Image (spheres, rainbow, N blue to C red):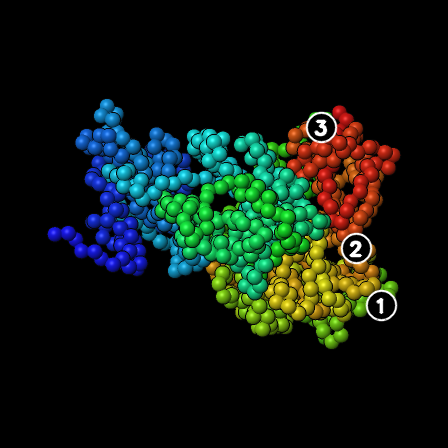
Amino acid sequence: MAGSQVLKRRRTALERAEKFLSESCFPDCNLRGRLFGDTCPLVSLSCFQTPQRIPHDEAVRQEFRPTKVGDSFGPTWWTCWFKVELSIPREWAGKEVHLLWESDGEGMVWRDAQPVQGLTKEGEKTSYILTDGLKEAEPHSLTVYVEVACNGLFGAGKGSLIAPPDPDKKFTLNKAELVVFNRDVHELLVDFEILVDMAKAQQFEWVRNWYPGLYAQIQDYAKEGRFIPVGGTWVEMDGNLPSGESMVRQFLQGQRFFQQQFGKLCSEFWLPDTFGYSAQLPQLMRGCGIRWFLTQKLSWSLVNTFPHSTFFWEGIDGSQVLTHFPPGNSYALKGRVEEMLKTMNNNRDKGRVNHSAALFGFGDGGGGPTQKMLDRLKRMSDTDGLPRVQMSTPDRFFSMLEKEKTQLFTWIGELFLELHNGTYTTQAQIKKGNRECERILHDAEVLSSFALTQKNTFQYPSIKLQHLWRLLLLNQFHDVLPGSCIQLVVEDAMRYYADGSVTMENGVIAAHLDSMGRVMSLRLVHSGRESVQDGHCANQFVIFDDVPLYWDAWDVMDYHLETRKPITTLLKPLEIVLAGGLRGSVKFSLQISEWSVITQEVILDAMCPYLRFLTQVDWNEAHRFLKVEFPLQVRSMNATYEIQFGHLQRPTHWNTSWDWARFEVWSHKWMDLSEHGFGVALLNDCKYGASVHKNVMSLSLLRAPKSPDPTADIGPHEFTYAVMPHRGSFQEAGVIRYAYNLNFPLHTVPAVSAQCPAWSAFSVHSPAVVLETVKQAEDRLDGLVVRLYESHGSTVVTWLQTSLPVKEAISCDLLERPDPSSHLPLEEHGLKLSFTPFQVRSVLLILRQ
């Protein structure tokens, strides 16, 4: 009897298809349940655990103890090495055989002393191909090792993603056996192609040093176009806090590495995840051979939705880069239909461009795509009703956008993330270490360059300096320098960095301080112009409750401003420390709480235009935010903040949502609030978080988040800031120069003679032009590179004079590639250089031998 015809229902048909492919429903009779056939136990399984990171050759010589499926290992951050002895049954000859391995933690298979594959249950990679068709004459018995790190893809947080690591967590081996793999069934499930990109030169360098065999394979795949180095930087760094020179070195070290190791420079800056983007980045990208930029992080903004997906981003000097924000708003898509539809429908520039990128795989924490993701995307290559999905390289993708760019809009200025504002302040010691290391490397290069020109026998320490720069660049990764990291990372990073009122006057400024160190008055002596708002106190320490909505170490929310409390408990009243002819200072202490204390020395040097605050804080708080406020007798609609190689203005009002979303912003060495003819600058030596609302300048000093590092910022801190009232604009007053003086104090050394002649290696005639860097050229032992930038926002022609033995000068880009058509004539006054606003220029100086 023939079967009855059944009415086809959409829901039923879809459910049948889903169950036919399901891993959990009906595996005894569906397609996926036939993926694995016969099984066979292992001959022997044993393990060795260590808290150390040891190489394979050392690990296999250790004493292994027997273990079995179901046993636990750990604790957190340890490494467990498993010795897997196996024998493939003779009757499996000609069949594809896998080692099926499911365990907590992140594993790596070693075979013949080479790393061959990762194993991660969270990343859906749980089998390793032992043979795709074992021949009878080949050995059936072998030993492999599985190295398992006792942490998951996202570490080992206790209870939540960003919780501090559970130091006592145990990990379990759930499955370890041999299985026959049904390739025919697999081909029904998947038929994929894959291109892999990696955006950090530092990771390639680690692989090159630790796993040279694997690295050689990567280089081979790169030649075939299957493994694609992208990004052009040493790490995916923070986009706000590194100095301009540090950002140049990120590109210099990254691009040179990719050129030397893979024979190519990157054309795209690939930075999917960081916490905002400096307005100086477009010029730095273009100067390093990069013309395209991809990120998606601004999709996280809490207040405003960014209006474009594909656009031109223009920096403060006018440089432009073609920029794309993947409309799927993620760098970890799973290749699902709804994600591709979102990518298509969320494109904010439809009609102007017809292509969008979709970043898929276990992208946050590592792991890459799974076969299931690849299969889903393959099915969407030509399906009615869905976007046409195809694998592409970044170069191919941006080349398609280039053909559609004529109608694109331009965004001018910074790309500000309206979230994670707390990262400007969290982990203050890391930020101080960063600023100190930037200063030390600057000075080391300058002094080494001078020594190179004075002594023929001097060996420029290029290898050592490169090593130190790379350590600093590593610590500028976007979850290290911002402070959004666990305690172990902080420890690693720090290993790399270690009525009683008084009046003070020096002929330039006069300050009146009360017994709590608050500045009641700060005025210019000659004009009598007052800086402090009537009826208010400057240098007022304030503390806020700081409990964000989402990401503890990353975020500070606007509602924290409602909890402001001035710190007024006096522990030790103001007392005079020095009252000499060259320096005067006073000192006091405040009680923050039962557990925390501020001790501050206020210093005024002879003829110095700023009042300096040397501050020590013993900080033992939880979810609190410490700031210092300066209410000023200044009114302006905008405040100016230093960024890399320049500055920008931000509003001091909260008229629009775009304005008040900037309640906490970032700055580098200085910020300034000026009206016509007068202003006040706030300088610092290691802080980044800041704000100016109406007439109140605030410098963010310390936070106390508890996730992912429960000890973040706890302990002693020392830092310096300074307040500088001035006539005229900040450019005319020399604020930028004085900020450099605070950050780069003079080094004193014993003189070899009382008759030492005056000598200056370099001088620049324009106060608008800053000589930032002097270093040995990367590719010429007889060359120095000097880097200068225009800091005022003006068009300038100036002279660079040097007393060094220079025989030739050539303009070069930030990668130090000379421009053959741009030889600079050496004239009596030196080198004549022209600058447009905020332009960065590099000059290669060839020395006489």
Q: Point out residue 157 in the picture as x, y percentages from the top left corner.
A: 41, 56
Residue 832, given in percent of the width and then of the height, sits at 82, 38
Residue underneath mark 1: 528
Q: Residue at x 18, y 56 (%)?
A: 4
Q: Quadrant of residue 158?
A: bottom left
- Per the model, the C-alpha gap separating discs 3 and 1 is 53 Å
Marks 1 & 2, CB-CB < 8 Å contact: no
**At which x and y percent is residue 309?**
56, 54
> Which quarter of the rendered picture does the C terminus lie within?
top right
Determine the secondary structure under disc 1. loop
Labels 3, 2: front one: 2
Q: Earlier in the sequence, mark 1 or mark 2?
A: 1
Of all residues, the one furthest to the left in this rendering is: 1
Q: In the drawing, what numbered circle is on residue 431?
A: none
Using residue 774 as the reference point, say whether residue 707 is left or right of it.
left
What amino acid is at disc 2?
Answer: Gln
| Residue type of the residue flagged with mark 1 | Gly
Of badges 3 and 1, nearer the viewer stands: 3
Query: Label 3 belongs to which residue?
Result: 782
Q: Nearer the viewer, mark 1 or mark 2?
A: 2
- Residue under label 2: 731
Q: Is residue 811 left or right of residue 286?
A: right
Q: Residues within 10 Å of mark 1 (few under 14, many from 20)?
A: few
Does residue 548 appear in the picture of this structure?
Answer: yes
Of residues 617 and 24, the one nearer the viewer is 24
Residue 132 vertical placement versus 593 (above, below):
above
Residue closest to the eye, 208 or 382? 382
Q: Residue furthest top?
A: 137
